[in-house]
């Protein structure tokens, strides 16, 4: 049997799950070898100057640096059958990833708010309005798709969800997904895929 040839992949990020973990899940599930390079914080200011857009993650493909986490993930997913069965499903994957990105942006604004009064205000609006608004819609979509975010196969969007939902439970507590059984189930299904389960046992433990 001829071994499939892959480019040399090096994923460069910080020692965090952050914006790289869904890409690591793609590598885990496909079994494609890659270097998981984690830049120590003290090396970053120097390295930043050498990066095209001054940010991480970067995926080096045969030495060529490619920026933007979701562009990278989408590229790998399309190449390896993790972006739905056709262009339509591939678009639905993008819609969910981008919508989840909108929610993550709002959560980030809350987490980085320094004014305690404004922070409380943001928290109240988040838990009463914003989070239920988004999660109810995601819940409905995943329930309709029998546990998948798009179609009836595992996609990179499932990985984006699993990573985000893990963070979500970490920020808001383990009961945060109690009203969302389909989302909870999606996260569990992804984390029980044998290759992901193995990755979870061996990945470096990081805060985020
Ligand atoms: N849209 C970019 C955003 C990348 C980004 O915000 N990277 C942050 C870490 S999550 C970063 O490199 N921060 C360090 C810096 O800006 O110096 C992507 O998704 O790749």
Image (cartoon, helix red, strand yellow):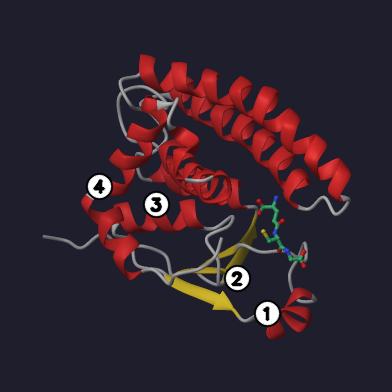
Asked if 152 appears above or below 64 in the picture, the reply is above
User: Within 10 Å of the Cα at label 3, are there few (<14), some (14-19), or many (20+) other Cα atoms?
Assistant: many
- Which element is circle 2 on? strand
Image location of residue 82, percent across then percent down: 37, 39
- Which element is circle 4 on? loop
Q: Are marks 1 and 2 in contact (CB under 8 Å)?
A: yes
Does 132 sit left or right of 195 as displayed?
right
Asked if 92 appears above or below 13 in the picture, the reply is above
Image location of residue 149, percent across then percent down: 42, 27
Disc 2 to disc 4, how far (Cα)?
Answer: 25 Å
Question: Residue under circle 2?
Answer: 14
User: Within 10 Å of the Cα at label 1, are there few (<14), some (14-19), or many (20+) other Cα atoms?
Assistant: few
Question: Residue under circle 1?
Answer: 41
Image location of residue 38, percent across then percent down: 54, 75
Disc 4 to disc 3, how far (Cα)?
Answer: 12 Å
Q: Which mark is residue 26?
A: 3
Does 176 sit left or right of 183 as displayed?
right
Mark 2 or mark 3, which is nearer the start of the sequence? 2
Image quarter for ligand 1 equals: bottom right
Disc 3 to disc 2, how far (Cα)?
Answer: 18 Å
Does 154 sit left or right of 64 as displayed?
left
Does 68 sit left or right of 7 as displayed?
right
- Which element is circle 3 on? helix
Front-most of residues 47 and 120 = 120
């Amino acid at each position: 049997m001829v071994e499939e040839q892959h480019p040399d992949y090096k994923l460069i990020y910080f020692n965090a799950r952050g914006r790289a973990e869904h890409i690591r899940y793609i590598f885990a599930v496909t079994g494609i070898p890659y270097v998981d390079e984690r830049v120590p914080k003290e090396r970053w200011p120097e390295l930043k100057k050498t990066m095209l857009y001054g940010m991480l993650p970067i995926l080096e493909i045969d030495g060529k640096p490619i920026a933007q986490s979701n562009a990278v993930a989408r590229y790998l997913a399309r190449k390896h059958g993790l972006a739905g069965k056709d262009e339509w499903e591939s678009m639905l994957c993008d819609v969910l990833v981008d919508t989840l990105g909108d929610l993550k942006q709002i959560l980030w604004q809350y987490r980085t708010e320094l004014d305690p009064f404004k922070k409380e205000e943001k928290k109240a609006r988040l838990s009463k309005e914003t989070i239920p608004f988004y999660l109810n819609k995601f819940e409905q979509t995943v329930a309709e798709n029998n546990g998948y975010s798009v179609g009836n196969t595992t996609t990179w969007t499932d990985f984006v969800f699993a990573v985000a939902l893990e963070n979500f439970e970490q920020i808001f507590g383990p009961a945060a997904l109690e009203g969302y059984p389909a989302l909870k189930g999606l996260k569990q299904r992804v984390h029980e895929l044998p290759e992901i389960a193995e990755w979870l046992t061996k990945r470096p433990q990081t805060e985020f």
